[in-house]
Amino acid sequence: MKTLHFKTNINCGGCIKAVTPTLNEQAGAGNWQVDTANPDKILTVTTDKLTPQQVVQAVEQAGFQIVAA
């Protein structure tokens, strides 16, 4: 398993709710989290199959900004 970190604009519970179906489908429930208390809104994904680009694409398709941290 590898752990990937990204800076995002996912900054509230509503945003997390909006991106949850996409990230659950791609990474699996329980394999990701967003630290909304961090100024950079860090998304952490634990995966053995996803590439950073796949995570970026999934989050962008959900309507959020994301860059590798």
Image (cartoon, rainbow, N blue to C red):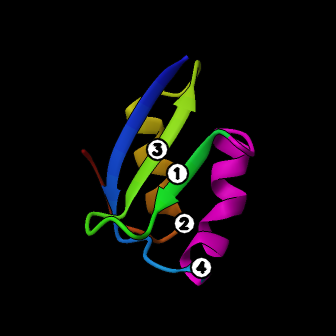
Q: Please, what is the three-letter code of the amino acid marked with disc 1?
A: Ala
**Above or below, 43 relative to 4:** below
SS majority, magenta: helix
- The Cα–Cα distance between marks 1 and 4, rounded to whole angstroms, is 18 Å
The quadrant in which residue 65 appears is bottom left
Residue 21 in the figure: left or right of residue 2: right
Q: Earlier in the sequence, mark 1 or mark 3?
A: 3
Q: Which mark is residue 62?
A: 2
Judging from the image, what secondary structure is the residue with disc 2 in?
Answer: loop
- Distance, label 4 to label 3, CA atoms, is 16 Å
3D distance between C-alphas at marks 1 and 3: 14 Å
Q: Position of residue 64 (x, y in %)?
A: 42, 69
Element type where label 4 sits in the image: helix
Mark 2 and mark 3 lie on one chain; the one further toward the N terminus is 3
Q: Secondary structure at mark 1?
A: helix
| Disc 3 element | strand
Camera-nearest label, 2 or 3:
3
In contact (CB < 8 Å): disc 4 and disc 2: no
Which mark's residue is nearer the viewer, 1 or 4?
4
Residue 18 located within the stretch drawn in magenta: yes
Image vertical order of residue 12 relative to residue 1, above or below: below
| Residues at discs 4 and 3 in contact (Cβ within 8 Å) | no
Q: Residues within 10 Å of mark 2 (few under 14, many from 20)?
A: some
* Residue bearing the label numbered 1: 58
> Which residue was labeled with disc 3?
44
Residue located 60% across and 65% down the image: 19
Q: CA distance from mark 1 to mark 2?
A: 6 Å
Marks 4/2: CA–CA distance: 15 Å
Q: Which residue is mark 4?
A: 13
Magenta stretch: give its range.
14-30
Question: Which corner quadrant holds the C terminus?
Answer: top left
Q: Is residue 32 in the magenta section? A: no
